Image (cartoon, rainbow, N blue to C red):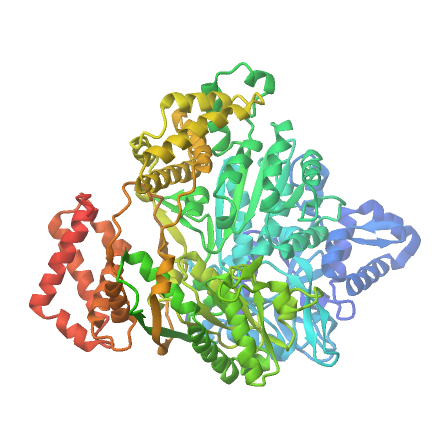
Amino acid sequence: MASGTKEIHFEAHIENYLVNTVKEYHSVSPNLYDKDLRVIPSEIIVFVKDSQPKKYEELAKQYGALVDTKIVENIAKNITKNKTLEVLRNGVKDRGQRLDLAYFKPANDKTPEHEVAYAKNRLAIVRQLKYSKRNNNEIDFVLFINGIPVITAELKNALTGQNHHNAIKQFMQDRLPKGEPFLDFKRCLVHFAVGTEKVFMATELKGKSTYFLPFNTGLENHSDTGFAVEYLWEDVLRKDSLLDLVQNFISVQTDKEKVYNPKTKKLEDKKSTKLLFPRFHQRRAVQRILNALKIDGTGKNYLVQHSAGSGKSNTITWLAYRLANFYQNYTDPKALYDSIIVVTDRRVLNKQIQDNIRQLDNTPGVVAYIDEKSTSQDLKDAIEDKKRIIITTIQKFPVIAQSVTNYPDRKYAILIDEAHSSQSGESSRQMRKALSLEEAEQDEADIKTADEIIADEIAKKGQQPNISQFAFTATPKQKTLELFGTKINGKIEPFDEYTMEEAIKEGFIKDVLQNYMSFKRYYKLVKRTEIEDKEYDKKKTVRVLGNYVDLQDHAIEKKARIMLEHFTSQTQNELQGQARAMLVTKSRLHAVRFKLKFDAILKEMNLPYRALVAFSGTVKDPDTNEEFTESGMNNLGGKISIPEALKLPANRILVVANKFQTGFDEPLLHTMFVDKKLGGASTVQTLSRLNRNRRGKDSTMVLDFVNDPELVRADFQHFYGKNYMEEENETDPNSLYTLLDEVDSFNVFYETEVEAFAEIFFKSNDNMEAIQPILAAIAKRFDNELEDEDKNAFKAASKSYTKIYRFLSQIIQFTDIDLEKKYVFLSALLKKLPYVKSDLPVDVVNDIELDSYKIQHKFTANLDLVSEDGEDYGMTPGGGGQKPEDEVDFLTKIIKVLNDTFGLDLTDEDKVDFNRVKKNLYENQDLMAYFNKGNSKNNIKDKFDEEVDGEFLNFINTKLDFYNKMTDEKANNLFKSLLFKEIYDREVRGLRK
């Protein structure tokens, strides 16, 4: 019979690898373990004698024959008092001697004595350790560093019918810490529950309340050669890794949050302490980056796509600390980076980095925190003083440009938190320029021509050889992926990823698409009989009228009552009666009106709580001319913030308008009411406010009054796996020439004016006022010679050019200086051009009345996602070309279309379904990719027919009549023929109507 089928064989396999295969541990008998002192005395003494003989001799002079006993007792006492991590890192004092209890790997070869000391560490494995004086319980194996226990593990072999769940149960039920000093919090650094398929970990044993975290390589572990979890002992538990974890990762984190105390009826600070052991993906991301830097050096970008719930804050902290003392080569005379700059808008991260790094390195002044209260000079001083780690906000980033140019030979690592919101614009270009090694001396610049200076500018603003950038985000946009992604086998991908799918399935965040309620509004408008029928732009009028309907008191009251009825009947009872809700509105005025309506209805219902509102500035209601502010409506007296006030039982609902939709983590949030059009990453970021875990939070709920649930599902699906971009779909630099041709076709400016502008702008001779007459003349020509339609088209093409050039200049270094000239010139000109008045037909609301309005619940469903990655596409010229002709129609016909679409009788409902099918086909990226000249027309048509039939199939359960009509052979063929011709002409032949 094959061996290895029992738990004991699993233990022996791990022991054999660590002791005999890699020879980094030695086996120690469990009999040598001292249950009173919770250490292995013989291991401690051998280590001290071997690594610190002189100190041992001095103590022997004082203690005499009791020296070994006294040393071990003192160390055991220190571990009980200060805990294991502190003792391993900082040693203990004994009769004037400081005894080191562990030696860590030196970062370079400048201290050979540290290399010798590191080699003297003694790593031991003890199997079947009887740790208790009260019973004969045995832990499968315990790892020791120099006689001090650091890791426990319970093993289960699947071939015995048990797995990691049984190991977790064993820890929870049989390894109770009460009365067992060996199991005290912070004595052992981590407890592993190990099956042959999965690994889980906990850093504090609390009986049934113990929280075990997954410690796996992904959703499934895999090995071609042995156990699926062999990474645990073949990587994580290896000597270098274990000591690296103790030195650079494991830390004690104290969190402080405001909680409501029902006894005192006040908000109080609640502190909680936890021992941080990196999850597998956190350690992996840091190690991968460090390994890559040993090869790459400076000058490259790295994208870390880690989902909400992944612990990004700690990953950023650990990486920043490691980079601050990172040597590319072991023989290098100095660290690779002079300063590490962390860019974040999260205050919690700022403090967390400081606190955690203080544990890892208590040298004063390692971290410089430049917050909103700090001045620009504080940031300059931090850079000039070569602070190892500088934490700042994106708002302060441009200040760097004014100071680091004094030190062109320094190297920088930039860590960007939530990169998609901070690193795609001009501030990023200027940052690269500021940190550039290529910075020219002023006296050199004075003698260069304008074209030479422009060439220098181009060189400075692209990717710089002395800058490494590390971007962290859960939802990378296309630009983020192109800027920071890594090319792997013809694709641009994140350097490391921990996906939304992993975070949900491992239980770190909630799946907010479960329990998704969709509502639809139906209304009927009528034209006032005394008003003459007039023509309006159809599309814009529909938009204005839709907004008008949603602001009507009747519409807001209908929605508000549905929301409050749901809240009182369901939400308020969740989370042991503590659940909160958020309403996301489309504008500040909507937020104000909903807040007022909520107040009135809550008072009418005699409910003991109210709603808060969040919006910026002052809102004037055009119907009443009354002005509203956030502070005035909430009446919090300036004593507490909105997030803190939401924790009070008197405040249960938060109404928001473009605030708290990102970065707001309140675990009590259970329900979200959505009355705003969402799309793309904003869908994920907004709804993800609900995803934070909390004890007792078993579900979430979304009530959506606006968005198509299938589009919401598609937005989440895009970010469910990792994001990638095929190399051929990158932004095409040649599109810039197409856009410039379009800009030039309007004859708004002459090349001589561009040259004159550049000559002044780039030479920086304090005569910038000289560019004003040039721009003024062009702006006048623009205003006098172009029709409104051409004005809009010129602006659109110019904006598209500046947007794409600004983006591409961060990735590639252009050799055509004319592109940079035009970029700077058009950027300035766009600011100077006169404003073209919006032609939204806002006056149309005076010509109509709302006849009827109702809201209908469509369905409640789980919007399930599938395991797949999200494909992205580069930027394409947008907004250029001739403005599409407005589709003009009489107001009566526009109202008819609206009533047909949203009306109560829905007699032409098929038209809505036609439009939905057409829209879905246009948004089907796989299908649109088929429409190219490289595919034959027949192949494209086959793919098209297949996708159309798939769209119609979606109606079989919901609208059988429509499905039957559209699967009729004649109707089906006619529809396919007409729509295929339209898309083929547009996408392949390039014809536009």
* For residue 442, above or below residue 427: above
Q: Is residue 578 above or below residue 888?
A: below
- Across and down, in percent, residue 609 comes to 61, 79
Q: Which residue is most to the front?
A: 530
User: How many callouts does the rendering have?
Assistant: 0
Q: Residue 255: percent from the left, percent from the top?
A: 68, 63
Q: Residue at x 48, y 74 (%)?
A: 700
| Residue 487 seen in render | yes
Image vertical order of residue 631 relative to residue 146, above or below: below
Image spot of residue 929 (x, y percent): 24, 50
Quadrant position of residue 792: top left
Q: Is residue 249 left or right of residue 762?
A: right
Q: Is residue 9 visible?
A: no
Residue 811 at x, y = what percent? Answer: 43, 36
- Residue at 59% x, 50% y is 344
Of 42 and 174, the residue lying toward us: 174
Q: Nearer the viewer, residue 64 or 555?
A: 555
Residue at the left extreme, as displayed: 970
Q: On the rendered image, what quadrant is the N terminus found in?
A: bottom left
Q: Residue at x 45, y 69 (%)?
A: 674
- Viewer-proximal residue among 437 and 177: 437
